[in-house]
Image (cartoon, helix red, strand yellow):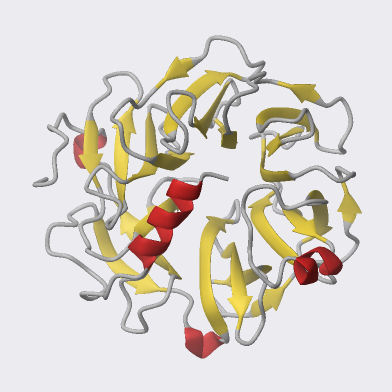
Amino acid sequence: MLQLFLKSLVIGLGLMSWGISHADEELLSNIEQITSPAMGFEKAGEAYFSPDGNMISFQAVPTGENGYQIFTLNLTTRELRQISRDAGTCTCSYFRPDGQKIIFAASPEQINAQQGGKYKWDLTPYMNIFEVNIDGTDPVALTEGPAYHAECAYSPDGSHIVYASNESGSMNIYVMRSDGSEVQQLTHTTHCYNGGPFFSPDGTKIIFRADRQAPDFLQIYMMDADGSNLVQLTDNGAVNWAPFWHPCQDVIAYTTSIHGHHNYEVYLLSISTKDQYRVTRNPAFDGLSTFNKEGTKILWTSKRGEDNTSQVFMADFTLPLGRPVKTSVNTNL
């Protein structure tokens, strides 16, 4: 998926780190690097809080291995557990709202071997969604077949799962019941990628990314949970991806190349006013931001640490004046 996007991401992740924090990151405090090579990870990222905020799930490449696997980490005890098993490569973990299950996407081991150990985010064949207990036991396949099924998240009440798939021949957004039944296709494009969907905190909306305007140049979109009332939220000629809702519902965080493909950053966007606010200000890659249930903490993926590898970071988070404030989007912000 999206050669320019992947190329830009690699470039961004290749920058030297200038330290964990930046003086102008006023929305972030108590920044902490959560994962590191010392924990046995060549790289890690795309982390999500459990509903009670005591645990996170994330994907990481173990040292000496090729594919991403799914892990959980107890933030209090620092107990680390791999919950993906017998899979070639995995991605897109997400806690069920009751905290008892986790979903993630995984491909068979032989698929990873056929791809020479490279993690491919785009058309990985036989990538299917699994639900497991919080300790990784009792896996249940919710999708099946040779298509790509991934980028999955539960609805706030846990009754449905939204995800991306190319089973129609083009990448589109789907929703199904949490047991894998009653699959419905929500987007119906044939010329572009649609992916990375998340339900709004009240379950009535879905945000996602798509390159509908031009190949590889992702923008952020929003639609009703049934696929109606499509609204484009960004239109800046940059690559915009990884949207995630703040619990206040009016605000989303997203990752953007507005400052150049060498320097992805996290921004806030108010859906009602379209005002924006820059969150991260570090020359290393920053992206894939997510919030805890209260919106008081943020997780994101960055290469700002001393180890100069892509890892998971966490910080206390405060909305600016309760909401994003209007700024002009330029490279001097």
Out of 134 and 6, give the one closest to the viewer: 6
Which residue occupies 23% across, 27% down? 275
Is 312 left, or right, of 270 in this rendering? right
Judge whether 268 appears above or below 301 on screen.
Answer: above
Q: Which quadrant of the structure image shows residue 114?
A: bottom right
Q: Nearer the viewer, residue 56 or 192?
A: 192
Q: Is residue 301 above or below residue 325?
A: below
Q: Quadrant of residue 199?
A: top right
291 or 59, nearer to the observer: 59
- Residue placed furthest toward the left: 332
Q: Residue at x 53, y 9 (%)?
A: 229
Query: Where does the image place residue 45, in percent across and percent down from the top left?
Result: 51, 64
How many numbered badges does the structure rendering display? 0
Quick one: quadrant of the C terminus?
top left
Residue at the far bottom: name it. 38
Q: Residue at x 87, y 38 (%)?
A: 179
* Residue shown at 60% from the left, 26% from the top: 203
Q: Position of residue 216 (x, y in %)?
A: 46, 38
Q: Position of residue 161 (x, y in %)?
A: 73, 36
> From this viewpoint, is residue 234 visible?
yes
Q: Is residue 292 visible?
A: no
Q: Nearer the viewer, residue 246 or 219?
A: 219
In the rendered image, residue 28, in percent from the top left (x then y), is placed at 26, 57
The relative height of residue 128 versus residue 139 in the rendered view (above or below) is above
